[in-house]
Amino acid sequence: MNLILFGPPAAGKGTQAKRLVETRKMVQLSTGDMLRAAIASGSELGKRVAGVMERGELVTDEIVIELIEQRLPEAEAAGGAIFDGFPRTLAQAQALDDMLKQRGSGIDLVIRLKVDDQALMDRIAGRFAESGRPDDNPDSFKVRLGAYNDQTAPLLPYYAGQGKLVEVDGMGSIETVAAGIDKALDA
Ligand code: AMP
């Protein structure tokens, strides 16, 4: 089972993905986590992406596609991946379809967490104080939300057209949203 957790920044994708890793033994593939690890390690890649990420802009398709490609064998061995924060552009979505097809698999389900923009701004205001993520400040967050609306949300018709899109209300408690996701997965 290959699942995409889809939604704007701070919608709860990471939290829900981590729960699914526990409950369903799937592998979480978060390009954001991979990029933050690259920055923390001081690698060349980390140096290249740090400024872009801090501003809240998207890094290039080539970089994230390669990061994902490197991790596909591991996800396959575990029986499936939860894609968290990837794909974010149409080029990434098409590359993902191609890579999975070459391996004899594909995306089974796309779960969209629906959250309204004001709720996201409120969430992020709380998170910035605790997370220490440089891109959780209000200015960068606005850029991230803009990138989602301009470049990522247009993927919704792509997946709806493939009959793979399911919407889950992302506004409730972590447990309520988790129950919605489980229902979609078990349907
Ligand atoms: P996230 O943790 O998913 O919110 O990602 C944090 C930041 O990493 C984003 O704001 C982008 O700068 C970068 N990033 C993560 N995933 C991608 C992706 N699939 N495409 C482009 N940039 C990404």
Image (tube, rainbow, N blue to C red):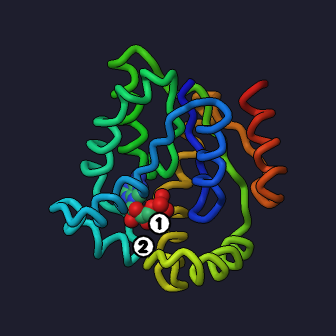
Count residues near mark 2 (Cα–Cα under 10 Å), then give few for <14, some for 14-19, many for 20+. Answer: many
x then y, percent, for residue 29: 45, 42
Query: Looking at the image, is 101 positioned above or below residue 49?
Result: above
Query: Looking at the image, is 120 positioned above or below residue 6?
Result: below
Q: Count all numbered tags in the image, as a single digit.
A: 2
**Three-letter amino acid code at the position of disc 2:** Gly
Q: Is mark 2 within 8 Å of ligand 1?
A: yes
Q: Is residue 157 left or right of residue 73?
A: right
Which mark, residue 147?
1
**Three-letter amino acid code at the position of disc 1:** Ala
Q: Is mark 1 within 8 Å of ligand 1?
A: yes
Residue shown at 54% from the left, 74% from the top: 131
**Residue in the foreground of this view, choosing between 108 and 22:** 22
Residue assigned mark 2: 56
**Residue in the foreground of this view, choosing between 160 and 178:** 178
Residue shown at 71% from the left, 38% from the top: 166
Mark 2–mark 1 CB contact (< 8 Å): yes
Residue shown at 39% from the left, 20% from the top: 101
Q: Is residue 154 left or right of residue 16?
A: left
Q: Is residue 164 left or right of residue 43?
A: right
> In what quadrant does ligand 1 lie?
bottom left
Cα–Cα gap, marks 2 and 1: 8 Å
x then y, percent, for residue 30: 45, 49
x then y, percent, for residue 58: 37, 63
* Location of residue 26 by image quarter: top right
- Secondary structure of the residue carrying tag 2 is loop
Residue furthest to the top:
104
